[in-house]
Each structure stands twice: as C-alpha cells, then as structure tokens.
Image (cartoon, helix red, strand yellow):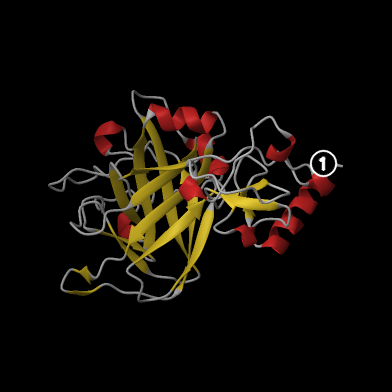
Amino acid sequence: MRAAGVLFLVVTAAASGCQPTPRSGWFRCDVDGDCPPDQRCVSGTCFRAPDRPEEDAGYDGGDHDVPDAGSDDASHTDAGLLDAGPPCMRRPVSFTPVADTAIIDNPSDCNGANYHGKEPFMNVGLGRALLRFVLNADVLEAWDGGHVVELDLRLGRQAGCGSGDCPATAGALEAHPLRVDWDEGPAPFDDYEGADWCRRTAQSRGGQEWEMDGASAPGTDVGAVSGSITVGIGESGVEIALDPDLHRPFVSTATAEITLAVAVWPVDGTVFVASSRESGGRTPELTVTVCD
C-alpha cells in the first residue's frame, strides 16, 4: 500500500508540473498553476485552499490568506497526496568552500608528488572536483528537524587555464556526497601534501588512500548520484540541485567543525573547468534552503 501511494504521488507531481520537496509531501511551486487543482502557491509551497480568500495585506504582498496549521484547509490527504503541511518561509543560507581541489586520472597523480588544491581552477574532465564546506549549527539543527528543503551547488566556469583558454566539451556533470577527510594541500607547493587520484591525505598525515582510486568507493568515499546537469560550452556557470537526504549521512561532526563535502564528476567525456576558491573569480557556493 505504501509503494502504491508513493507512485501516485510521483505521477500527480509530474502531471501538475511541480515537485515534492525533500523530506515531506509538500510541493514546491512558483505560481498557482504549478500546484494540484485544489492547492495554491504561497512562498514557494503548495497548500490546500478550496475557496480563494479575500486579500490579506498582512501576508506575502497582500494576495494570500494562510489557513491555521491545525485547520482542515492546512492539509491535503485526498487522492493519495501526503499531508501538505502549512506554508513556510524559505531561508537560503550560503557557504563558500574552505577547501577545493581536482584529483586527476593520471599515473603521475596516483600516490605521486602532484596535487592541484591551490590551482585557480578544477578540471572536471581530466579528473573530478572535490569541495568541502563548513556549515553552522543552525543549519544542522534544521536539517535534522526535516526543515532543509533544497541543497544547491553553484560552480563558475573558469575562462583561462595557464597560457590559453580552458577546454570545454558539452555533456553532463553529476554530483555525489563525499567523505570530508581529505587534504587540499598547502601553498606554496610541497610534494605529497595534497589529495591525488589514489591518496586522500597528505604524507605528513599518513598518506591515507581512498578506498578506491578516484574517490569512488560506494558508501565509503562517495554516496549515490545526488544531482546532475547537462552543460554546454558557453555557460558562465552551472547550478546543480542536490538531494539533501543523500548528503545528510556524509555530514561530519567528528571535529569542532560541521563539514560537508561534494564530488563533481564528468559524464562520458564532458569537460567543464570550474573556478576554484583561489581563482579570484566566481567562487563555488553551496546553498542550503531552510523552511522555517
């Protein structure tokens, strides 16, 4: 019975043009037309409102009347839809990386002296981008309370690589949750002190290896694909929508910091050279949207 209800929810969402938010049966929306027929869009969330109310100048620009959370109009359980719950105020919280690097699929970059953590770009094509962020306690509390509804990674495209333009090949990128215990490597460069294709920690910290080369061991190095996007060769940047539920188990509180890491892989020959935090240009950004 549960499986049938979930299937009906997915079919209903597709038909109405909206998507259920993570961790709930709510629907994200931009306009009323994105919602099921008996629901309306308020602050990006669909809720049931059988009769269009009179204007209420005290809420969201004056064109919405929000029912009490405990009233019949605040939920929708008909026809297999899950409880929509009350509308919420969406609060985006953004973070820039504290570490980022590329690990390159190259014999000289496997247990070798080369690392790329202090370069101004990350070549997702020759290798994979690794990014680590420090979150705050407020976001973690909201996440554990089921109030994180979106997780988005933004990457800028790097224009120049050394003496020429950066390469670009159209295709797709995919993102994965990533373990957080890897080293970016210091500047100035110091041999064997940053993550490479085979090792995740600096030689001075034991030179520990990934479970599988390329940080690719399922469940240990990385999680399942949490988001993907098709890219061309001319965008100034991309935004990848990630699944918060897949990333939460990889959030670490093992140290005094709350850390989350993401790996970005090319698909079938795609090349996308992203700006790193050292680029001086468009710094990568992770945005966690909390539903208060």
Q: Position of residue 212 (x, y in %)?
A: 48, 47
Q: Position of residue 91 (x, y in %)?
A: 43, 41
Q: Quadrant of residue 159?
A: bottom left
Query: Which quadrant: the N terminus?
Result: top right
Q: Quadrant of residue 129?
A: bottom left
Element marked by disc 1: helix
Instruction: Reply above or below: 61 against 124.
Output: above
- Tag 1: residue type? Arg
Q: On the picture, is 140 further left or further right than 134?
A: right
Q: Position of residue 89 (x, y in %)?
A: 49, 40
Front in this rendered view, residue 81 or 87 = 87
Instruction: Reply above or below: 274 against 68.
Output: below
Circle 1 packing at 10 Å, graded few (<14), some (14-19), many (20+), is few
* Residue furthest to the right: 1
Front in this rendered view, residue 46 or 11 = 46
* Residue furthest to the front: 54
Q: Residue at x 32, y 46 (%)?
A: 195
For the image shown, how many numbered marks are present on the structure?
A: 1
Q: On the picture, is 186 further left or further right than 182?
A: left
Does residue 104 appear anywhere in the picture?
no
Q: Residue at x 38, y 36 (%)?
A: 181
Q: Residue at x 37, y 67 (%)?
A: 272
* Residue furthest to the left: 188
Q: Position of residue 197 (x, y in %)?
A: 37, 52
Instruction: Reply above or below: 151 against 31.
Output: above
The residue that disc 1 covers is: 2
Front in this rendered view, residue 252 or 77 = 77
Does residue 102 appear anywhere in the picture?
yes
